[in-house]
Image (spheres, helix red, strand yellow):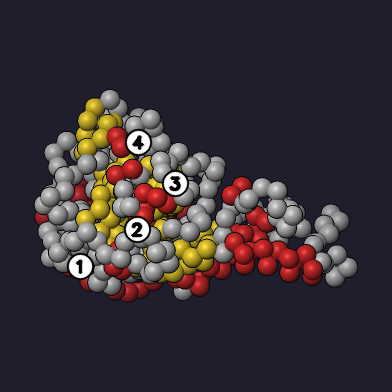
């Protein structure tokens, strides 16, 4: 048996004075910020104008931004709109009214910090936007999100996209609720040379704990370690996909979009286990059938039973064929239902047809936390890490990359978007996208000088 590693919390090792000094230091560095919370489920969305994705409520006097992608001019992708009247007052330099619109050239490269930043990111500000302002139609020439040209091997395409299809051009729409949240700087942000600066090996681990606690306090949400759905593998070694459970779900699938997305994902998952071409005829038949039913409409009982049996018929322990193992089917089920819920976020009719049980089963996928697989030197598991959308305050800096901003007063994080896989919002390898500007430009409403950067793990 390995010898037990000493712990900093051993009774004869613990330094209460040092802990008090560290907590006092955190108190001096605390800065208020705004967390932008994705309320869940779609059937209980609040009535707010701030949101991710969809189409922007651009006033008529604002043009849709155009930038450069792979040497060609193209419309930028719309990422978010933030109604400043909905924000907690944590910074006196922020507008108290008006709407901020965030755009970026969100192609496969995701290189935003260039010599001409306005060719890659753009933030528009409208002082007044009517409540009933119509959304702007998607302009011609928009490239697919994360696209580098037609390719069936684009590994970051949505799991439901079939090989010969182009990806979506509009991000998943989801409302955002702004709430106050405490923040603290990364170690590299701390002023150099201060006598009370804590040791590097102590500060980061405590910072992770403080950030987690702040996110929990701000959102009312909690990490769920190793949570499992009805259809994914539990801790039992003899687990199999719950075929009988599925057959007893007489109302499943409840809406056409579930047929569409789940059929697509199952088709793509079975393709992964083979080499060469795979016949998608049955998948396309279900996709077409879902379209005839209507993505927002309820299938009849015969269609529901036939689709459930089609799923069951794909489960087999044999490798290399056009079937899926129990484990793979469980994963496919989650991917397909996540995609259906993402669609329902922009369709109140579809959202109302998805049952509460399914929403509850998927809710952990929408939490703004990542379970850590790392351990501390004494063997304890590191706490879960936060993955929140945020404005202002101190934000995580994966590589301490901040583009140079013009103006005085230091840089301000206008918006940081985290990787949010449940709604297909991806930045690098589980990274983040941040919009920066100077304090002077924020005060003077010079949002035309915002710069952006995508950081990746």
How far apart marks 3 and 2 lie (CA) works out to: 44 Å
Q: Which tag is nearer the camera, tag 1 or tag 3?
A: 3
Q: Position of residue 401 (x, y in %)?
A: 51, 41
In which quadrant of the rendered view does residue 385 lie? Answer: bottom right
Mark found first going from the N terminus, 3 or 4: 4
User: Do tag 4 and tag 1 residues touch (Cβ < 8 Å)?
Assistant: no
The numbered dot on residue 408 is: 3
Q: Quadrant of the N terminus?
A: bottom right
- Name the outermost residue toward the top: 71
The numbered dot on residue 403 is: none
How far apart marks 4 and 1 lie (CA) works out to: 37 Å
Q: Position of residue 335 (x, y in %)?
A: 37, 54
How far apart marks 1 and 3 lie (CA) works out to: 45 Å
Q: Which tag is nearer the camera, tag 3 or tag 4?
A: 3
Q: Is residue 391 above or below residue 118?
A: below
Query: At numbered mark 2, what does the secondary structure look like: helix, strand or loop?
Result: helix
The numbered dot on residue 338 is: 2
Tell me the crowding category of disc 3: few under 14, some 14 to 19, or many 20 or more residues within 10 angstroms, Cα based.
few
Q: Residue at x 62, y 59 (%)?
A: 207
Query: At numbered mark 1, what does the secondary structure look like: helix, strand or loop?
Result: helix
Q: Position of residue 107 (x, y in %)?
A: 32, 37
Q: Is residue 295 left or right of residue 380?
A: left
Q: Is residue 190 left or right of residue 368?
A: right
- Name the outermost residue toward the right: 12
The numbered dot on residue 348 is: 1
Mark found first going from the N terminus, 4 or 1: 4
Q: Position of residue 387 (x, y in %)?
A: 48, 57
Q: Residue at x 73, y 69 (%)?
A: 20
Mark found first going from the N terminus, 2 or 4: 4
């Amino acid at each position: 048996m390995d010898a037990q590693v000493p712990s900093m919390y051993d009774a004869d090792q613990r330094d209460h004075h040092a802990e008090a000094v560290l907590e006092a230091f955190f108190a001096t560095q605390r800065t208020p910020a705004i967390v932008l919370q994705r309320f869940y489920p779609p059937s209980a969305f609040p009535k707010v104008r701030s949101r991710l994705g969809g189409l922007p409520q651009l006033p008529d006097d604002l043009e849709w931004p155009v930038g450069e992608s792979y040497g060609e001019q193209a419309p930028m992708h719309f990422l978010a709109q933030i109604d400043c009247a909905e924000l907690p007052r944590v910074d006196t330099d922020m507008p108290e009214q008006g709407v901020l619109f965030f755009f970026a050239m969100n192609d496969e490269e995701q290189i935003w910090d260039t010599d001409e930043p306005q060719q890659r990111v753009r933030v528009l500000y409208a002082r007044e936007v009517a409540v009933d302002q119509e959304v702007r139609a998607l302009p011609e020439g928009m490239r697919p999100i994360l696209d580098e040209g037609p390719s069936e091997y684009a590994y970051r395409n949505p799991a439901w996209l079939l090989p010969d299809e182009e990806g979506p051009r509009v991000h998943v729409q989801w409302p955002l609720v702004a709430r106050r949240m405490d923040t603290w700087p990364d170690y590299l942000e701390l002023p150099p040379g201060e006598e009370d600066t804590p040791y590097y090996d102590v500060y980061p681990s405590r910072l992770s704990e403080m950030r987690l606690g702040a996110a929990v306090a701000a959102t009312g949400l909690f990490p769920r370690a190793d949570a499992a759905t009805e259809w994914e593998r539990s801790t039992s070694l003899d687990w199999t996909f719950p075929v009988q459970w599925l057959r007893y779900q007489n109302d499943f699938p409840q809406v056409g979009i579930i047929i569409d997305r789940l059929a697509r994902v199952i088709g793509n998952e079975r393709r992964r286990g083979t080499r060469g071409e795979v016949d998608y005829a049955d998948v396309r038949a279900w996709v077409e059938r879902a379209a005839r039913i209507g993505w927002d409409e309820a299938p009849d009982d015969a269609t529901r039973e036939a689709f459930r049996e089609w799923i069951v018929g794909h489960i087999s322990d044999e490798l290399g064929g056009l079937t899926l193992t129990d484990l793979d089917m469980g994963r496919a089920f989650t991917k397909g239902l996540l995609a259906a819920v993402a669609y329902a976020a922009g369709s109140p009719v579809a959202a109302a047809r998805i049952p509460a049980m399914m929403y509850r089963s998927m809710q952990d996928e929408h939490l703004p936390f990542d379970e850590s697989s790392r351990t501390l030197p004494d063997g304890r598991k590191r706490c879960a890490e936060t993955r929140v959308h945020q404005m202002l305050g101190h934000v995580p800096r994966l590589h301490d990359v901040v583009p140079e901003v013009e103006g005085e007063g230091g840089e301000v994080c206008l918006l940081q978007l985290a990787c949010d896989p449940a709604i297909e919002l991806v930045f690098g390898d589980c990274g983040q996208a941040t919009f920066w500007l100077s304090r002077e430009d924020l005060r003077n409403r010079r949002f035309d000088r915002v710069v952006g950067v995508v950081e990746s793990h």
